[in-house]
Image: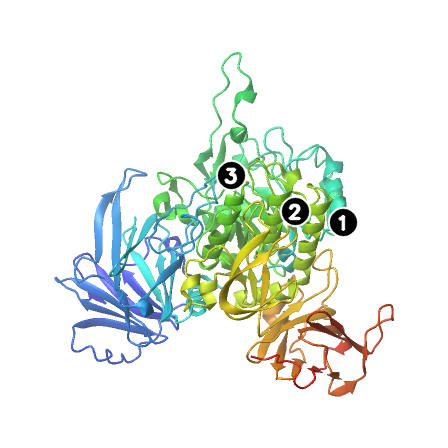
């Protein structure tokens, strides 16, 4: 601990990957911190020598994962913080004097007196190896990937008619050729962060409207380590229900109950894979699922018989249902009086407009305001209100509602007093506390299930509660489509792994078949795959004619086939805090070409996605980082790093597979739980070394995976000059619904027709015959070659207790398949 004129500074190793710098005391209230769980401080360890820097007045030092924070000075003199990596390089630090201050201020939002903490951090740039770029900070603040040289107001707000909602996650991930680190500013208070760049280095200036601040230094040295350390502080992402990774169809307003069923039946009749229908609230005369904004009861005529209609949707048509709501209560809602009497309501939200003047029509009220009828916010900073609010949803739980569309949670203004404190302090955490209401309620009432929320706003820690995000009410243009990619990537780099957009955009404009098809292709590779819009019937996959419908079906089916890959990434998110969508800099930090590249992304480590975001494009530029990359559609092989241009007719999204990868795929299904994974395909593309991977499986719906009821299967592909060998291990672990036998197909990139194919199942060699069209499938393994470069080997009846080995050999001298 170091004493200063402004207060105490405490530096402690907090977790194995983080060091906490506490400036001027604990958070004002516990809810003003995002950190949860069993965290530090760690026991003190002997401080290593300061890497030969000579004798200095080091007052405090702490070390985590090799990284180190030092404090010099104190007392009546200046205080200086320095941050070092595991090799002893000084990454950044405060200037010699005046880098940490606390001052009395009058906040502009409320006019009240308070305090503001400021910290300035600087780094000097000595050369290329010191070049640092910044990522994260939540969603918003501009449609750019690299945060270096930008200013960020950390205050959640809805930005309509733009690229997306702005919500703050005060996590900054620094990536450089020499290593990565993170800075997590742990306060919910209104704040601002400036990242300035000059010829001599960078300067970070952070200020928060509160009397104290916890700054966590996340050690790295890889981006993956930074995000894992961050998740260790704020909570590992919840394991999602598997259905949430399928295609989700949002709706708005209906004519009658038959209209609802017509949409659902059309999805099934057209064999467009879909897992859930999402139902909007009623707005004035426009009828949705409930009686109106701020009501939790069904619309009396559209949903005259809710149990029967929900049975038809959920049991007959096998579609989950999700209901929409705002964090408000309407004065005419049955719960309103009790909530008001118990002090659960704030005095702000959606005030009713003034009555029309004599002779004016109510229709003159702007459509966007027709739902503003005096509703008031529920005060989610009150723990009793959170418990009570969930209790009002129990009827929906009993009827089988599977998830919650939580709209409009940006929170009250800074002048609002809440149960937990001033909104200047807790505004950014308002929706996080609403998420707690649902997550804790689900844990009580459906303890074996998995909570799932679709949220317009958010905050640090939302990932642990089962909360996913979408970009809100955005424009319907190619420019807005292009902006979604860097916004989603920065949210992923903020520790929020589940994110998506309104496919086609939200606000009505010139949505045509081309824009919808291109957006649908992009959506198929986002963690959340969901279509929605103001004119929502133009956001149905069949709305733009047979050609676009066929394109939508193609990508919805591909999404379903990639479900095992997505689900494995979900397990990696849950266990290690890793994102599903990743900027290329995440895996290729040494490549200057990707530091600012926000027009394409990686899905996990093995799939590179380059969405087409310009009207009329028949060809598209793609940058391939180092290594071998294969065109998913044609099999053509490219060697990176290099830019290429690929043909992009309307049905083609540029998609590449990393050389040296094994991508697990399943069968085409109409919903994610249609059948177990009894038909597994392994997509194998040779690279310079042995490829390894793991297949993760569980029941997709319960918490039993926490008790060990899941299966992990090791995958391996060994590549020689004349052969490829694929090994599928025996699954470790069991779970309910696990297939006892499955068919395994290896789809191997191969430049020539194989000379021999051998298969060993359970250690015993089995016959392998060439596949013939029309021949019945039986217990024999088969193989075929698909020109120009794919060998298929299909092995049926592989027991879960048996390992599998497949070896494909080519003629000597016919071509190398290793690098």
Q: Earlier in the sequence, mark 3 or mark 2?
A: 2
The alpha-carbon separation of the residues under discs 2 and 1 comes to 12 Å
Q: Are marks 3 and 1 in contact (CB under 8 Å)?
A: no
Circle 3 SS class: strand
How crowded is the residue under tag 3: few (<14 C-alpha within 10 Å), some, or many (20+)? many
Q: What is the secondary structure assignment of the residue under circle 2? A: strand
Disc 1: which residue: 268
Label whose residue precedes the other's in the sequence (2 or 1): 2
Do residues under tags 3 and 2 come within 8 Å of each other at their CB atoms? no
Identify the disc placed on residue 249.
Answer: 2
Residue 804 appears anywhere in the view: no
Seen at 38% across and 55% down, the residue is 147
Q: Residue 546, how many percent across, how many down?
A: 73, 45
Placement of 55 over or under 377, stated as above or below: below
Residue 358 lies, with reference to residue 472, above or below; the image says above
Vertical side of 726 occupied by 27: above or below = above
Give the quadrant of the C terminus.
bottom right
Please indicate, yes or no, whether residue 122 appears anywhere in the rendered image. Answer: yes
Q: Residue furthest front?
A: 813
């Amino acid at each position: 601990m170091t004493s200063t004129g402004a207060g105490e500074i405490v530096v402690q190793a907090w977790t194995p990957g983080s060091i906490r710098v506490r400036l001027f005391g604990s958070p004002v209230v516990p809810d003003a911190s995002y950190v949860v769980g069993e965290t530090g401080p760690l026991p003190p360890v002997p401080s290593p020598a300061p890497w030969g820097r000579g004798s200095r007045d080091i007052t405090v030092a702490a070390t985590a994962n090799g990284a180190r924070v030092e404090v010099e000075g104190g007392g009546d003199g200046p205080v200086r913080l320095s941050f070092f990596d595991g090799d002893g390089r000084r990454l950044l630090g405060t200037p010699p004097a005046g880098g940490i201050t606390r001052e009395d201020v009058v906040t502009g939002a409320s006019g009240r007196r308070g305090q503001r903490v400021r910290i300035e951090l600087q780094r000097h740039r000595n050369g290329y190896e010191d070049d640092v770029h910044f990522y994260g900070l939540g969603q918003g603040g501009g449609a750019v990937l690299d945060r270096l040289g930008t200013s960020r107001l950390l205050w959640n707000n809805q930005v309509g008619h733009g690229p997306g909602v702005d919500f703050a996650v005060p996590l900054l991930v620094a990536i450089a050729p020499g290593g990565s680190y993170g800075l997590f500013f742990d306060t919910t208070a209104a704040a601002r962060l400036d990242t300035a760049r000059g010829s001599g280095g960078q300067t970070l200036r952070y200020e928060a409207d509160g009397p104290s601040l916890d700054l966590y230094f996340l050690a790295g040295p890889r981006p993956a380590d930074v995000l894992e350390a961050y998740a260790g502080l704020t909570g590992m992402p919840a394991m999602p229900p598997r259905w949430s990774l399928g295609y989700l169809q949002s709706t708005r307003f209906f004519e009658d109950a038959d209209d609802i069923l017509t949409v659902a039946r059309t999805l099934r009749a057209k064999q467009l894979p879909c897992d859930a229908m999402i139902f909007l609230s009623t707005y004035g005369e426009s009828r949705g699922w409930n009686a109106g904004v701020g009501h939790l009861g069904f619309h009396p005529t559209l949903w005259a018989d809710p149990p029967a209609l929900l049975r038809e949707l959920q049991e007959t048509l096998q579609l989950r249902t999700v209901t929409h709501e705002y964090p408000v209560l309407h004065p005419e809602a049955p719960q309103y009086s009790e909530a008001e009497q118990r002090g659960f309501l704030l005095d702000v939200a959606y005030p009713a407009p003034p009555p029309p003047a004599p002779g004016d029509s109510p229709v003159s009220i702007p459509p966007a305001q027709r739902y503003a009828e005096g509703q008031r916010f529920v005060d989610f900073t009150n723990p009793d209100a959170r418990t009570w609010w969930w209790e009002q949803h129990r009827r929906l739980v009993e009827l089988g509602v599977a998830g919650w569309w939580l709209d409009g949670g940006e929170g009250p203004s800074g002048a609002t007093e809440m149960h937990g404190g001033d909104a200047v302090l807790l505004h950014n955490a308002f929706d996080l506390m609403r998420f707690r209401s649902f997550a804790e309620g689900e844990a009580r009432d459906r303890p074996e299930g998995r909570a799932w929320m679709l949220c317009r706003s958010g905050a640090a820690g939302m990932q642990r509660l089962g909360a996913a995000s979408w970009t809100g009410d955005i424009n319907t243009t190619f420019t807005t489509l292009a902006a979604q990619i860097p916004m989603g990537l920065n949210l992923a780099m903020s520790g929020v792994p589940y994110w998506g957009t309104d496919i086609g955009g939200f606000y009505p404009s010139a949505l045509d078949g081309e824009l919808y098809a291109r957006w649908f292709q992009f959506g198929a590779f986002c963690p959340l795959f969901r279509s929605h819009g103001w004119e929502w019937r133009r956001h149905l996959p069949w709305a733009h004619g047979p050609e676009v419908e066929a394109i939508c079906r193609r990508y919805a089916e591909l999404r379903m086939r990639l479900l095992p890959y997505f689900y494995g990434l979900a397990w990696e998110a849950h266990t290690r805090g890793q994102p599903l969508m990743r900027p290329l800099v995440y895996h290729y930090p040494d490549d200057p070409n990707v530091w600012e590249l926000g027009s394409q992304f990686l899905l996990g480590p093995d799939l590179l996605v380059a969405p087409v975001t310009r009207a009329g494009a028949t060809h598209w530029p793609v940058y391939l980082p180092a290594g071998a990359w294969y065109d998913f559609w044609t099999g053509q092989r490219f060697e990176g790093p290099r830019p290429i241009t690929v043909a992009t007719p309307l049905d083609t999204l540029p998609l590449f597979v990393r050389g040296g990868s094994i991508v697990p795929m399943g069968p085409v299904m109409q919903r994610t739980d249609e059948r177990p994974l009894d038909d597994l395909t392994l997509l194998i593309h040779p690279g310079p070394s042995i490829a390894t991977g793991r297949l993760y499986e569980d029941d997709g719906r319960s918490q039993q995976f926490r008790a060990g009821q899941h299966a992990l299967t090791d995958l391996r592909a060994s590549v020689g000059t004349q052969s490829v060998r694929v090994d599928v291990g025996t699954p470790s672990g069991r779970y309910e619904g696990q297939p006892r036998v499955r068919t395994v197909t290896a789809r191997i990139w191969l430049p020539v027709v194989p000379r021999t194919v051998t298969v060993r199942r359970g250690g015993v060699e089995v016959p392998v015959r060439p596949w013939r069209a029309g021949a019945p499938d039986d217990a024999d393994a088969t193989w075929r070659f698909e020109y120009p470069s794919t060998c298929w080997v299909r092995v049926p009846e592989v027991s879960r207790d048996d390992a599998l080995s497949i070896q494909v050999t080519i003629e000597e001298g016919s071509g190398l398949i290793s690098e």
